[in-house]
Image (cartoon, rainbow, N blue to C red):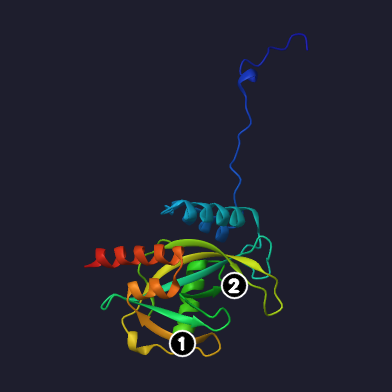
């Protein structure tokens, strides 16, 4: 309009762009933890990116009923620092030796899920985190069963420790067997790259405590 001075900064004004991310605190906290985690190899980097996409885009990422693209799970490699042994169970449904863990039951925090599931499946009541940070990340397929279609578990893994290895008690509904193994034995039993990667990290954590 006549008589109005032009804004000298008008040509320089730009919109402030905010990176997309989760809007609720639980997903935001997990997103930050995932971004802090340094992948050990290209496979884990790919899986970290997949889990990040799920967490940052899907409000229901923790729900076990989110089948596409899957949901977040929490699992635990339980170790006895005094012996260096790791606890595995022979999973009844999947018929495989696995670390302990499972689905979110309202925690909206895979670390809390891992602690609860490990206590339930091992009978151990003194479990503590060997490290506050994520141990490993893995996305893997789960076959159809129990009325659920095939889907992906976006697994966030932690290392836990116990001082009472003799107190284990098998949950017969979940496990055919529950047993302590050396790290080398566990790697052979699990026979899978992601598990070997996680077990190598546990060896490093235990060595750092000595």
**Residue most extreme to the right:** 1
Callout 1: SS: strand
Q: Nearer the viewer, residue 86 or 104?
A: 86
**Residue most extreme to the top:** 2
In the displayed structure image, the side of residue 91 where residue 210 appears, left or right: left
| Quarter of the picture holding the C terminus | bottom left
Residue at x-position 68% and y-position 66% = 67
Residue 189, x across and y down, in percent: 42, 76
Which corner quadrant of the image does residue 152 belong to?
bottom right
Residue 14, x across and y down, in percent: 62, 27
Spatial CA span between label 1 and label 2: 27 Å
Do tag 1 and tag 2 residues touch (Cβ < 8 Å)?
A: no
Tell me if mark 2 has few (under 14), some (14-19) or many (20+) residues whose alpha carbon lies within 10 angstroms of its own: few
Residue at x-position 37% and y-position 67% = 199
Residue 76, x across and y down, in percent: 44, 72
In the rendered view, tell whether residue 198 sits above or below residue 181: above
Q: How many marks?
A: 2
Q: Which disc, if any, is residue 177?
A: 1
Whether residue 124 is visible here, answered yes or no, is no
Which corner quadrant of the image does residue 193 belong to?
bottom left
Q: Nearer the viewer, residue 166 or 109?
A: 166
Residue 82, x across and y down, in percent: 25, 78
Whether residue 152 is visible here, answered yes or no, is yes
Per the image, the residue denoted by label 2 is: 106
Residue at x-position 58% and y-position 42% = 19
Residue at x-position 30% and y-position 63% = 204
Callout 2: SS: loop
| Marked residue nearer the N-terminal end (1 or 2) | 2
Q: Nearer the viewer, residue 14 or 2?
A: 14
Tell me if mark 1 has few (under 14), some (14-19) or many (20+) residues whose alpha carbon lies within 10 angstroms of its own: some
């Amino acid at each position: 309009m006549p008589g109005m001075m032009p804004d000298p900064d008008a040509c320089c004004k730009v919109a402030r762009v905010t990176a997309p991310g989760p809007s609720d605190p639980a997903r935001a906290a997990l997103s930050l933890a995932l971004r802090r985690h340094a992948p050990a190899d290209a496979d884990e980097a790919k899986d970290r990116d997949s889990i990040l996409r799920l967490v940052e885009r899907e409000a229901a990422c923790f729900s076990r009923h989110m089948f596409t693209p899957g949901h977040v799970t929490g699992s635990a490699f339980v170790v006895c620092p005094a012996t260096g042994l790791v606890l595995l169970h022979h999973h009844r449904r999947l018929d495989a030796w696995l670390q302990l863990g499972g689905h979110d039951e309202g925690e909206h925090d895979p670390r809390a899920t891992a602690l609860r599931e490990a206590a339930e499946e091992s009978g151990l009541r003194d479990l503590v985190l060997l490290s506050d940070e994520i141990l490993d990340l893995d996305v893997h397929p789960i076959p159809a069963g129990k009325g659920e279609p095939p889907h992906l578990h976006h697994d966030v893994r932690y290392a836990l420790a116990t001082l009472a290895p003799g107190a284990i008690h098998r949950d017969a509904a979940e496990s055919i067997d529950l047993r302590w193994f050396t790290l080398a034995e566990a790697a052979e039993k699990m026979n899978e790259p992601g598990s070997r990667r996680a077990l190598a990290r546990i060896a490093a954590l235990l060595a750092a405590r000595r």
